[in-house]
Amino acid sequence: MRPAQSLVFVLGLLTACEPNANIDPVTVQWMDWPAEVNAGQPFRTRLVVWSVCALNPQFRAGASADQSAVTFAPYFLVANDQIECLTERTRALLALIAIDTAGTAPGLVALSARSYEMRAPTLAFTLSAGAQNLSVSKFGVVVVRPSGADTSRRNAAGYVNVERDSLNCARVRPMGLYAPNAALVLEDQADTAGLSAAFVNGSLHTVTVPVCGERRVFHRVTPG
Protein backbone atom coordinates (compact mmCIF):
# COMPACT_ATOMS: atom_id res chain seq x y z
CA MET A 1 0.00 0.00 0.00
CA ARG A 2 1.39 3.42 -0.96
CA PRO A 3 2.04 5.94 1.88
CA ALA A 4 -0.72 8.32 0.76
CA GLN A 5 -3.22 5.48 0.38
CA SER A 6 -2.24 4.10 3.78
CA LEU A 7 -2.84 7.49 5.45
CA VAL A 8 -6.26 7.85 3.84
CA PHE A 9 -7.15 4.32 4.99
CA VAL A 10 -6.12 5.11 8.58
CA LEU A 11 -8.12 8.34 8.64
CA GLY A 12 -11.13 6.48 7.27
CA LEU A 13 -10.97 3.99 10.13
CA LEU A 14 -10.63 6.80 12.66
CA THR A 15 -13.70 8.55 11.31
CA ALA A 16 -15.72 5.36 11.66
CA CYS A 17 -14.56 4.89 15.26
CA GLU A 18 -15.36 8.45 16.36
CA PRO A 19 -18.94 9.11 15.21
CA ASN A 20 -19.54 11.97 17.66
CA ALA A 21 -16.46 14.00 16.83
CA ASN A 22 -14.81 15.66 13.89
CA ILE A 23 -11.28 14.71 12.90
CA ASP A 24 -8.87 17.54 12.15
CA PRO A 25 -5.60 16.11 10.71
CA VAL A 26 -2.39 18.06 11.25
CA THR A 27 1.14 18.02 9.88
CA VAL A 28 4.31 17.17 11.79
CA GLN A 29 6.90 19.94 12.02
CA TRP A 30 9.48 18.02 14.01
CA MET A 31 10.01 14.46 15.14
CA ASP A 32 12.63 12.79 17.30
CA TRP A 33 12.82 9.13 18.31
CA PRO A 34 15.29 6.51 19.61
CA ALA A 35 17.99 5.75 17.05
CA GLU A 36 17.81 2.10 18.09
CA VAL A 37 15.14 -0.03 19.78
CA ASN A 38 14.75 -3.67 20.69
CA ALA A 39 12.38 -5.79 18.64
CA GLY A 40 8.83 -5.85 19.98
CA GLN A 41 9.42 -2.80 22.18
CA PRO A 42 7.01 0.14 21.71
CA PHE A 43 8.89 3.43 21.76
CA ARG A 44 7.99 7.01 22.52
CA THR A 45 8.34 9.51 19.71
CA ARG A 46 8.30 13.28 20.16
CA LEU A 47 6.00 15.06 17.71
CA VAL A 48 5.72 18.80 17.14
CA VAL A 49 2.47 19.48 15.27
CA TRP A 50 0.44 22.50 14.25
CA SER A 51 -2.35 23.61 16.57
CA VAL A 52 -6.04 23.70 15.63
CA CYS A 53 -8.82 26.18 16.22
CA ALA A 54 -11.23 24.32 18.51
CA LEU A 55 -12.44 24.10 22.10
CA ASN A 56 -10.62 21.42 24.15
CA PRO A 57 -9.24 19.42 21.21
CA GLN A 58 -8.01 15.89 21.97
CA PHE A 59 -4.75 14.85 20.33
CA ARG A 60 -4.22 11.43 18.77
CA ALA A 61 -0.86 10.42 17.29
CA GLY A 62 -2.38 7.95 14.81
CA ALA A 63 0.61 5.58 14.89
CA SER A 64 0.73 2.47 12.71
CA ALA A 65 3.42 0.17 11.35
CA ASP A 66 3.93 -2.22 8.47
CA GLN A 67 6.86 -4.32 7.28
CA SER A 68 8.90 -1.29 6.20
CA ALA A 69 7.86 1.79 8.17
CA VAL A 70 6.27 3.44 11.16
CA THR A 71 3.75 6.07 10.09
CA PHE A 72 2.22 8.76 12.27
CA ALA A 73 -1.04 10.29 11.01
CA PRO A 74 -1.68 12.84 13.81
CA TYR A 75 -5.04 14.49 14.27
CA PHE A 76 -7.22 16.26 16.81
CA LEU A 77 -10.68 15.15 17.84
CA VAL A 78 -12.93 18.20 18.04
CA ALA A 79 -16.55 18.23 19.15
CA ASN A 80 -19.28 18.64 16.56
CA ASP A 81 -20.41 21.74 18.44
CA GLN A 82 -16.91 23.21 18.46
CA ILE A 83 -16.48 26.96 18.88
CA GLU A 84 -15.15 28.61 15.77
CA CYS A 85 -12.24 31.03 15.90
CA LEU A 86 -13.54 34.48 16.67
CA THR A 87 -11.63 36.32 13.97
CA GLU A 88 -9.50 35.71 10.92
CA ARG A 89 -6.58 37.15 12.91
CA THR A 90 -7.03 34.49 15.63
CA ARG A 91 -7.12 31.75 13.02
CA ALA A 92 -3.99 33.11 11.33
CA LEU A 93 -2.09 33.30 14.62
CA LEU A 94 -3.02 29.74 15.57
CA ALA A 95 -1.75 28.56 12.20
CA LEU A 96 1.72 29.74 13.22
CA ILE A 97 1.79 28.01 16.61
CA ALA A 98 2.97 24.46 17.06
CA ILE A 99 2.31 22.07 19.95
CA ASP A 100 4.98 19.87 21.54
CA THR A 101 3.52 16.42 22.11
CA ALA A 102 4.33 12.74 21.67
CA GLY A 103 3.11 9.44 20.32
CA THR A 104 4.00 5.80 20.94
CA ALA A 105 5.20 3.71 18.02
CA PRO A 106 4.27 0.01 18.11
CA GLY A 107 6.85 -2.70 18.65
CA LEU A 108 8.60 -3.75 15.43
CA VAL A 109 9.69 -7.16 14.17
CA ALA A 110 13.39 -7.91 13.60
CA LEU A 111 14.99 -11.38 13.48
CA SER A 112 18.30 -9.59 12.88
CA ALA A 113 19.27 -5.92 12.94
CA ARG A 114 17.30 -3.96 10.35
CA SER A 115 15.89 -0.47 9.79
CA TYR A 116 12.37 0.89 9.44
CA GLU A 117 11.50 4.30 8.00
CA MET A 118 9.84 6.92 10.21
CA ARG A 119 7.10 8.75 8.29
CA ALA A 120 4.54 11.48 8.87
CA PRO A 121 2.62 14.13 6.90
CA THR A 122 4.53 17.40 6.50
CA LEU A 123 3.99 20.88 5.11
CA ALA A 124 3.90 19.40 1.61
CA PHE A 125 0.25 18.34 1.78
CA THR A 126 -2.92 20.38 1.46
CA LEU A 127 -6.48 19.74 2.54
CA SER A 128 -8.11 21.89 -0.11
CA ALA A 129 -9.66 18.91 -1.87
CA GLY A 130 -10.11 16.65 1.14
CA ALA A 131 -8.28 13.74 2.69
CA GLN A 132 -7.29 12.20 -0.63
CA ASN A 133 -4.48 14.76 -0.88
CA LEU A 134 -2.80 13.59 2.33
CA SER A 135 0.74 12.34 1.77
CA VAL A 136 3.64 11.44 4.01
CA SER A 137 7.36 12.18 4.04
CA LYS A 138 10.30 10.19 5.35
CA PHE A 139 11.84 11.75 8.46
CA GLY A 140 14.56 9.14 8.92
CA VAL A 141 15.01 5.56 10.12
CA VAL A 142 15.01 3.58 13.36
CA VAL A 143 17.29 0.55 13.72
CA VAL A 144 15.58 -2.44 15.31
CA ARG A 145 17.72 -5.10 16.99
CA PRO A 146 16.71 -8.44 18.50
CA SER A 147 18.35 -7.19 21.72
CA GLY A 148 21.05 -4.85 23.02
CA ALA A 149 19.81 -1.61 21.41
CA ASP A 150 21.88 1.52 22.16
CA THR A 151 19.50 4.02 23.75
CA SER A 152 21.97 6.89 24.16
CA ARG A 153 21.15 8.63 20.88
CA ARG A 154 17.94 9.88 19.28
CA ASN A 155 17.41 10.61 15.61
CA ALA A 156 15.66 13.85 14.75
CA ALA A 157 14.28 15.64 11.70
CA GLY A 158 11.89 18.37 10.71
CA TYR A 159 11.40 21.98 9.73
CA VAL A 160 13.49 24.45 11.72
CA ASN A 161 14.67 28.03 11.88
CA VAL A 162 18.18 28.96 12.96
CA GLU A 163 18.74 31.57 15.65
CA ARG A 164 21.59 32.94 17.75
CA ASP A 165 21.40 33.70 21.45
CA SER A 166 23.01 36.55 23.38
CA LEU A 167 26.36 34.70 23.33
CA ASN A 168 26.16 34.24 19.53
CA CYS A 169 25.56 30.48 19.89
CA ALA A 170 23.71 28.96 16.93
CA ARG A 171 20.61 26.92 17.69
CA VAL A 172 17.86 25.32 15.64
CA ARG A 173 14.25 25.74 16.70
CA PRO A 174 11.42 23.51 15.45
CA MET A 175 9.19 25.75 13.35
CA GLY A 176 6.28 27.25 15.26
CA LEU A 177 7.54 26.13 18.70
CA TYR A 178 8.23 29.17 20.90
CA ALA A 179 9.00 27.70 24.35
CA PRO A 180 12.28 29.16 25.75
CA ASN A 181 13.97 25.75 25.95
CA ALA A 182 12.80 24.49 22.56
CA ALA A 183 15.88 25.61 20.59
CA LEU A 184 18.64 23.00 20.23
CA VAL A 185 22.35 23.85 20.24
CA LEU A 186 24.08 22.97 16.97
CA GLU A 187 27.09 20.73 17.47
CA ASP A 188 28.86 22.30 14.47
CA GLN A 189 28.51 26.02 15.11
CA ALA A 190 29.80 26.86 11.62
CA ASP A 191 27.20 24.70 9.83
CA THR A 192 24.31 27.14 9.64
CA ALA A 193 23.90 27.59 5.87
CA GLY A 194 20.39 27.00 4.57
CA LEU A 195 18.79 26.54 7.98
CA SER A 196 16.01 29.12 7.68
CA ALA A 197 12.63 27.39 7.22
CA ALA A 198 14.52 24.26 6.14
CA PHE A 199 13.91 20.55 6.62
CA VAL A 200 16.94 19.03 8.36
CA ASN A 201 17.97 15.55 9.47
CA GLY A 202 20.29 14.67 12.30
CA SER A 203 20.59 13.24 15.77
CA LEU A 204 20.53 14.31 19.40
CA HIS A 205 23.41 13.05 21.49
CA THR A 206 25.63 13.91 24.44
CA VAL A 207 29.10 15.31 23.74
CA THR A 208 32.16 15.11 25.98
CA VAL A 209 33.11 18.77 25.53
CA PRO A 210 30.14 21.15 26.04
CA VAL A 211 29.03 23.32 23.13
CA CYS A 212 27.72 26.72 24.19
CA GLY A 213 27.60 25.39 27.74
CA GLU A 214 25.42 22.40 26.86
CA ARG A 215 26.30 18.75 26.38
CA ARG A 216 23.09 17.64 24.68
CA VAL A 217 23.38 18.89 21.08
CA PHE A 218 21.90 18.48 17.63
CA HIS A 219 24.24 16.90 15.09
CA ARG A 220 23.19 17.76 11.55
CA VAL A 221 23.83 14.94 9.08
CA THR A 222 22.32 16.26 5.85
CA PRO A 223 21.85 19.69 4.26
CA GLY A 224 18.57 21.47 4.91
Image (spheres, rainbow, N blue to C red):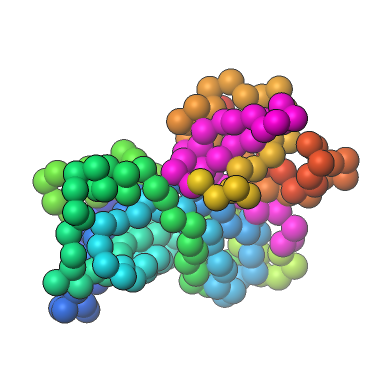
The answer to whether residue 17 is left or right of residue 73 is left
Name which residue lies at 39% across and 48% down. Answer: 97
220 shown above or below 54: above
Name which residue lies at 75% across and 48% down. Answer: 216
Name which residue lies at 42% across and 50% down. Answer: 98
Which quadrant does the N terminus fall into?
Answer: bottom left
Residue 43 location, x and y as percent?
57, 68
The answer to whether residue 198 is left or right of residue 92 is right
Please say whether residue 90 is one of the residues in the magenta stretch. Answer: no
Span highlighted in magenta in the image: 150-177
Name which residue lies at 55% across and 40% down. Answer: 173
Residue 217 location, x and y as percent?
72, 43
Please say whether residue 158 is one of the residues in the magenta stretch. Answer: yes
Residue 105 location, x and y as percent?
49, 67
Q: Which of 52 and 111 is in front in this view?
A: 52
Residue 109 location, x and y as percent?
53, 69
Q: Quadrant of residue 218?
A: top right
Numbered circles on residues, count: 0
For this orientation, the residue located farthest to the right is 209
44 shown above or below 121: below
Could one spot residue 7 in this view of the protein?
Answer: no
186 shown above or below 216: above
Could one spot residue 37 in this view of the protein?
Answer: yes
